[in-house]
Amino acid sequence: MGDFDVVLAADFASAEDTGARVAAECAVQWDMGLRTGLLHLPSAPGRRIVPDIHRCLRERLAEIVELDQPVSTRLLVVHAPTALAPLPATLANLRTQRIVLVHDRSPDRDTLGRLMGLARAPIVWAPTNRWVRAAVDALGLPIDVEEIDWRPPVGTPLGRERARRGNGRFTIGHIDFGGAAHWPDRAEALASLLPADGSVDIRLLGRPPASLLSRDTIPDAWRVRERGAMTIDAFLDGLDALVYAPAGMPGTVPDSVLGIALTKGCVVATLPHLRHHLGDGPVYGECGDLFQAAISILERPGLPDVLERAALSATRQFPRELHVERVTRLADLRSPALPATATRPRPRTRRVLFLASNGVGLGHVSRLLAIANRSAGRFEPIFVSHAQALPLLRGSGYPSEYIPSLSDTGADPRLWDRWLRSELERLIYAYEAEALVFDGNNPTPGIVEAAQAQAPCRLAWVRRGMNGPLASPYLSNAEHFDLIIEPGEIAAERDRGATASLRHEALQIDPVTLLDPGDLLDREEAARLLGLDPSRQAVLVQLGAGAHRDVVTLVDRVVRCLRTFAGLQIVIAEWANAIAPLSLWPDTTVVSAYPLSRYLRAFDFCISAAGYNSFHEAIAFGVPTVFIATTHAAVDDQRGRARYAQDMGAALELPEDKLFQLPAVCAVMLDHRARAVIREKCALLRRPNGAERAAGAIAELLSAA
């Protein structure tokens, strides 16, 4: 493990603001050029380390300290020591020149015995505020006490700028810092602090104590995230104001979180007795008045100037320079350095996890693969797939991981989503991924929380439009994404789905296809590889994987019709994740090549479903197509796409209940003059491939981190 300059020890699973305080110290010490170790001293077993600490480790601001072998440090800083359990025997392996006990609550004689294992070096006590200092003085012990309170160094923002929502309402937040003492003392006071009338958006990180509000009675207007679901930094990014109105004087003051909020341009509203500790940055008032006080500040015409003054006040109350001075002095360092700016160390190649949903076909996988293929060295794609497409992804040269889908496991949806979060967190951490890009219809809480718990992992959603009548229950999770990319729809004017009115949330790009026209094989080569005669007419039948309709019966009806045309070569596409095999017709050719679009020039026309990929490939590559759309309520609006293409003269649309018209439709498609007209109309609708723009947007997202 080697030697450290500073080791910070604490219960890193604490629900209080210890994680944010330690993260701030790690950032300053990294800027100083110091090597910082983190020693986890759990006060209770089985709890998760808070995301703020994970972020320090992922950004390499600090390293985990393992005491299975001797470790030495110049300075050991123990945060919240009186909250710890008895110290482990392995602590004897840690050698230090000086120890600082950072007391954020009033110590007492009964708990001091827990700290006896530290008495192997000079000990300095460091109260965090005037109330704790008074309690230390009252003990009357012959101890060395720091003259200046040990304040968190939050003088500059620790994360990205706060993102305001575009719905016209303010967002007010509250954080559970552990225990009822950090909440108002009455339900009526809580209701005045956090109204439930929908006039503002209320976000909570942690739930109110049951004595104030039971789990079953949390208002619908409140958005509640469990503690540990995201970093404090990420939570504050989504707020306009943070309110804090503890009942009386709690044992601890979350000054690091309040200070960070101020420096991020967030209005902080709290009680008057904290003014001497927090300075002029917050707005002060009694509990019943705090909500309106925050709104009044937010509605001021000169709000930017108010927020700037509040941030400057916070830099004076919680200066980084003070932490530099005390660490330099206590660790006996010779020449401290604090650069004005510092570049965080990153992996040599910036990695991005691409998570593809387990759709009924390969559309989600193919879109992400199209984007990944255009990364151009700007990032390294790592695939995570629910679909049975791992061989395809690995065959494309990408590292790929498989997580069984909900339908594959048959598990309870909530339990599966929690498991998904755990698996994604593990992969984000293992690959040091700086972004998670999801392509699917349902961005579940597990997906969102996995990225937020592994900050600074950014979160992007490739959100296809033309949704069917069954809207995703997770559309509101869009607010947690740093980037939403909407692949273009040629039939966008027919979009009546749930996201059609939400396009302002997303980056609108051209349609995404895996291949460009220049990637397709010519007719002779494609036919040769498929075992076809290029001089004879050929048709491709690709009607989907069969998850939402009886594709075997449908293909059988289509093949029976096609057999009536003498000399026509019939090829049936079988998806990698097909429900049933399609090798049932001896006079046909079954292909499962991927991507099948590479061979499209071997065919005179197609009979196809109207999924996103098949539809846009047909238009982009000028393939005359008869669309037999899937109309199941759970899939996208394939009928809308197909009808639009027919109305534009770029395809023919045949409803499944009118399959008796297929012979006449095929006769049209076998006429080269009709096919020429369709190709001309396709050319009028054709648009550039949006995959390159999507890859660029992801690269920009990483650059902005």
Image (cartoon, rainbow, N blue to C red):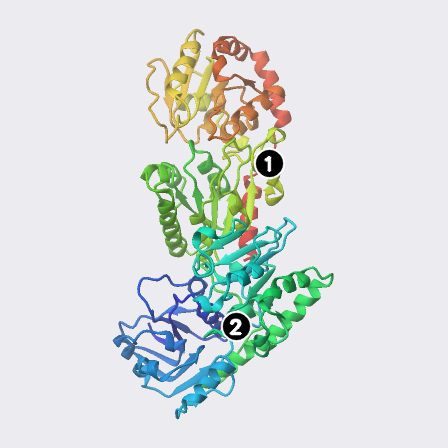
Q: Residue furthest right?
A: 301
Pointer 2 residue: 255
The foreground one among 334 and 11 is 11
Q: Disc 1 to disc 2, how far (Cα)?
A: 43 Å
- Mark 1 or mark 2, which has the lower sequence index? 2
Residue at the spot 54% in from the left edge and 80% down from the top edge:
322
Tell me the element at label 2. Answer: helix
Place of residue 451 in the rendered image (x, y in percent of width and height, measured from the top left): 45, 53
Place of residue 605 in the rendered image (x, y in percent of width and height, measured from the top left): 50, 18
The answer to whether residue 397 is seen in the rendering is yes
Q: Quadrant of the N terminus?
A: bottom left
The answer to whether residue 523 is seen in the rendering is no
Q: Quadrant of the C terminus?
A: bottom right
User: Identity of the amino acid at label 2?
Assistant: Asp
Q: Quadrant of residue 2?
A: bottom left
- Residue 500, disc: 1
The foreground one among 86 and 371 is 86
